[in-house]
């Protein structure tokens, strides 16, 4: 059964080289996922792919049905899930184009459907989240990056903000004081829901821009899109080496 899955983010709504075997429209107890699940082959290995923001990139971060996405992947047999995401770089070493495999999260989101545990309190509701990402999956990604000669930073704290607006410079200062190295809008509740479903989940973050107040002038969508092109191509090489390892 397929077990590797990739959730694609901004700049990675499609995975070049992925041969689509079939698309499956899935219904879950939480509604529909962002798009039909793509069952495909990548270098002769079966994988699942789901574009987080929809096939035509129409779903903003705060309206993604994270619960349905993770549920659908689990139901389709995924055990290991990589969430690719565009982020802003707060840490000075995390400039545009940098790929980071984060190891910690701080959640600043609000009003999102953030848990699968509702009503039936006979279930365990308090997942351990000391290490929010699956360490074994993080390691396999880092090893794959080495094998593919793709430079990555192998740790960092991801601050998940609500969006869809970008942050103020002072909000970024606060995030930095809190210990955040990166800022993005989709890391939560995705990581926590994966843990609730006992999926091994890791993030692969691509810096699209310096965070607010850290670069020069305004942050534009044109800048973000431009910077993501090269970064996402390197993510593809990294994932290609990751998939080949199974
Ligand atoms: N902030 C939040 N999310 C982002 C950013 C940012 O600067 N860039 C890309 N996603």
Image: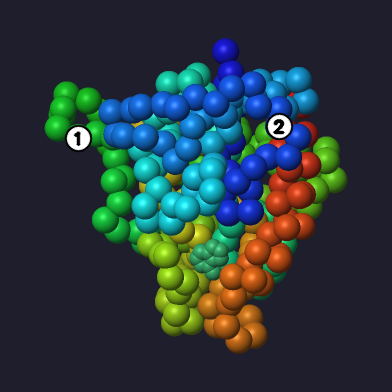
Whether 121 is drawn above or below 66: the answer is: above
Q: In the picture, which quadrant includes the C terminus?
A: top right
In the image, what residue occupies the spot 80% across and 48% down? 150
Viewer-closest of 143 and 7: 7
Instruction: Decide which of 88, 135 is in the foreground and name it.
Output: 88
- Indicate the quadrant where residue 138 lies: top right
| Pick the front one: 212 or 66 | 66
What SS does tag 2 mark?
A: loop
Q: Position of residue 165 (x, y in %)?
A: 43, 70
> Which residue is at a point 16% across and 27% down the rendered structure image?
120
Ligand 1 near label 2 (Cβ, under 8 Å)?
Answer: no
**Residue annotated with mark 1:** 118
* Circle 2 Cα neighbour tier, 10 Å, few/some/many (<14 / 14–19 / ≥20): some
**Residue in the image at 63% along x and 81% along y:** 215
Would residue 62 appear left or right of 234 to someone viewing this image?
left
Q: Nearer the viewer, residue 197 or 237?
A: 237
Numbered circle sitting on residue 18: 2
| Number of numbered discs on residues | 2
The secondary element bearing badge 1 is classed as loop
């Amino acid at each position: 059964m397929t077990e590797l899955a990739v959730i694609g983010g901004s700049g990675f709504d499609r995975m070049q080289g992925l041969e689509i075997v079939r698309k499956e429209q899935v219904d879950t107890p939480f509604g529909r996922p962002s798009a039909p699940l793509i069952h495909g082959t990548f270098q002769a290995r079966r994988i699942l792919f789901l574009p987080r923001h929809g096939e035509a990139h129409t779903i903003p971060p705060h309206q993604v049905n994270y619960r349905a996405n993770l549920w659908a992947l689990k139901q389709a047999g995924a055990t290991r899930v990589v969430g690719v995401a565009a982020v802003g770089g707060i840490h000075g070493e995390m400039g545009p184009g940098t790929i980071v495999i984060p190891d910690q999260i701080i959640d600043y989101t609000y009003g999102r459907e953030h848990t699968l545990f509702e009503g039936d309190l006979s279930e365990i509701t308090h997942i351990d989240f000391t290490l929010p990402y699956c360490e074994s999956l993080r390691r396999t990604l880092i090893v794959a990056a080495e094998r593919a000669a793709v430079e990555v930073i192998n740790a960092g704290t991801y601050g998940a903000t609500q969006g869809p607006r970008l942050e103020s410079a002072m909000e970024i200062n606060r995030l930095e004081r809190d210990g955040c190295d990166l800022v993005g809008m989709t890391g939560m509740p995705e990581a926590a829901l994966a843990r609730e479903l006992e999926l091994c989940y890791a993030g692969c973050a691509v810096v699209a821009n310096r965070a607010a107040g850290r670069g020069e002038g305004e942050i534009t969508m044109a800048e973000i899109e431009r910077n993501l092109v090269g970064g996402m191509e390197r993510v593809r090489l990294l994932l290609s080496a990751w998939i080949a390892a199974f």
